Structure formats: C-alpha cells, structure tokens
Amino acid sequence: MLHSLVIGFTLAFAAGADFEPFVPTISFHQLFEGLSLGIRIAALPAPAGAQQSSLVWLRPILALLFVLTTPAGILSGLIAFVNGHRWGASGGAVGAKVAEGVLCAISAGMLIYAACVAMPAGDFVLNPTL
C-alpha cells in the first residue's frame, strides 16, 4: 500500500505532456495491483486462536485502506506542490521534474524489492520443502 501512496504522490507532481500518458498507465497498473491484492486479501487465513468472525471486519478494512492510499498520495502531493509554490520554492518546472523522477525511482525500487526479496522470502518461509 505504501507503493500506491508514492504512486499517487508522483501523479500529483506530473504535469504537461507527462500527465496525459501517465494517468492511463497508472490506472492500468492500479487495476491489476488491486486485483492481485484483492485475491490475497480474500485468501487471508484466520489468525491463530481467532474466531472466523474477526475476518469479517479485517478484509473490508484492508480493502478500504488499499482503495484510499492512491487518492491520499495524490492529495498529499497536491498539498505539497501548492504549498511549495505558496512559500516561494524556487526551481519551478525543473524542481517538479526532479521530484517526479525521485518519486518514480522510489516507487520502482519498492517493486524491485518486493519482487526480488519479499516475495521469494515468503515462499521459502512458508514452504519448508524448498
């Protein structure tokens, strides 16, 4: 979900010609990320010693948190962008491009970490035969 927050923050900084292809790309990306995360949330096992009724609230809360993270990132990015101009931050378009590039790099780093470290580690921990 932190990745979605950074994506929303990046989307808030995108402007001009970069914005037009960025929106459908992010929408497509978020669609499949949401589908995969939804499948994982639906398959959550009950915590040890917990009632099955605890999942009645856990699943909708996790889904709602995922739904709200990208818009929260966009809102926080817009607030930072507007306040930066209000406080007289210099740099203008160059500063916005640098911020957008750094945020894209952070987002890509999160995905690379998840793919190369977190997911294989989960497989080794949960499957002792490997």
Image (spheres, helix red, strand yellow):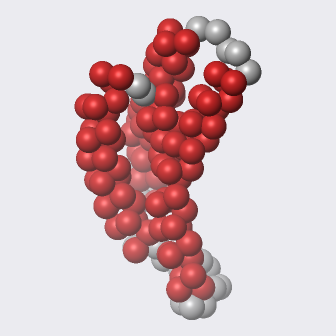
**Residue visible at 59% across and 8% down?**
91
Outermost residue toward the front? 86
Query: Percent x, y for residue 93?
Result: 49, 13
The image shows a total of numbered marks equal to: 0
From the viewer's perspective, tell me whether residue 35 is left or right of residue 71: left
From the viewer's perspective, tell me whether residue 53 is left or right of residue 15: right
Q: Is residue 68 visible?
A: yes
**As displayed, is residue 91 above or below residue 67?**
above
**Residue visible at 35% across and 23% down?**
16
From the viewer's perspective, tell me whether residue 20 is left or right of residue 115: left
The answer to which image quadrant residue 99 occupies is top right
**Residue visible at 40% across and 73% down?**
43
Query: Percent x, y for residue 120?
Result: 41, 45
**As displayed, is residue 69 above or below residue 64?**
above
**Residue visible at 26% across and 47% down?**
28
Outermost residue toward the right? 87
Q: Is residue 118 visible?
A: no
The answer to which image quadrant residue 75 occupies is top right
**As displayed, is residue 31 above or below residue 94?**
below
From the viewer's perspective, tell me whether residue 81 is left or right of residue 27: right
Nearer-the-camera pick, 27 or 120: 27
Query: Percent x, y for residue 112?
Result: 41, 32
Nearer-the-camera pick, 65 or 15: 15
Query: Percent x, y for residue 111?
Result: 42, 37
